Amino acid sequence: MDYKIYQSLRFKQELSKFNKSLQDRVEKIKDELVKTPYSGKPLGVNWFREKRYENYRIYYLVYENLQSVFMAGISNKKDQQKTINTIRLLLDFFKQELENLIKKDKST
């Protein structure tokens, strides 16, 4: 079964600040994650992963029970650990945001 891809509000805001080539790459990553959500490098646990593109890292969370992938952050190599730590701190918030997006999706 295909996974549905969602982006956090924060992720969308961050992505809009980057150049077109990174934005295009994120679109390709999204297309790939629909079929293979566990591609990319695991970050300590199977459901928290990253994909690399040039000097950037795209972070996402896989929610198997919701058949969803939630794109949570982007960083360069320099800010990698800070971003990973922030995402870990906000896991409950991200799950709530995802559940709200799914409800909104179902109602439209």
Image (spheres, rainbow, N blue to C red):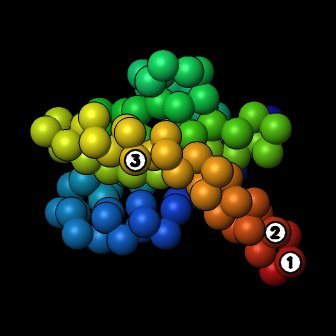
Left or right of 65? Residue 28 is left
Disc on the earlier residue, 1 or 3: 3
Query: In the rendering, at what x and y percent does residue 99 appear?
Result: 75, 60
Q: Which residue is at 32% across, 50% downward?
A: 74
Left or right of 54? Residue 2 is right
**Is residue 30 visible in this depiction of the protein?**
no
Quadrant showing the N terminus: top right
Distance Cα–Cα, label 2 vs label 1 = 6 Å
Question: Which amino acid, mark 3?
Answer: Thr
Q: Which residue is at 57% across, 40% downward?
A: 61
Residue 19 sits in which quadrant? bottom left
| Farthest residue, direction front | 89
Q: Badges 1 and 3: C-beta atoms under 8 Å apart?
A: no
Q: Provide the residue designation for mark 3.
A: 86
Q: Residue 103 carries which label?
A: 2
Q: Badges 2 and 1: C-beta atoms under 8 Å apart?
A: yes
Residue 17 sits in which quadrant? bottom left
Q: Residues within 10 Å of mark 1 (few under 14, many from 20)?
A: few
Distance Cα–Cα, label 3 vs label 2 = 25 Å
* Rendered view: 61 above or below 102: above
Q: Which of marks 3 and 2 is in front?
A: 3
Q: Provide the residue designation for mark 1.
A: 107
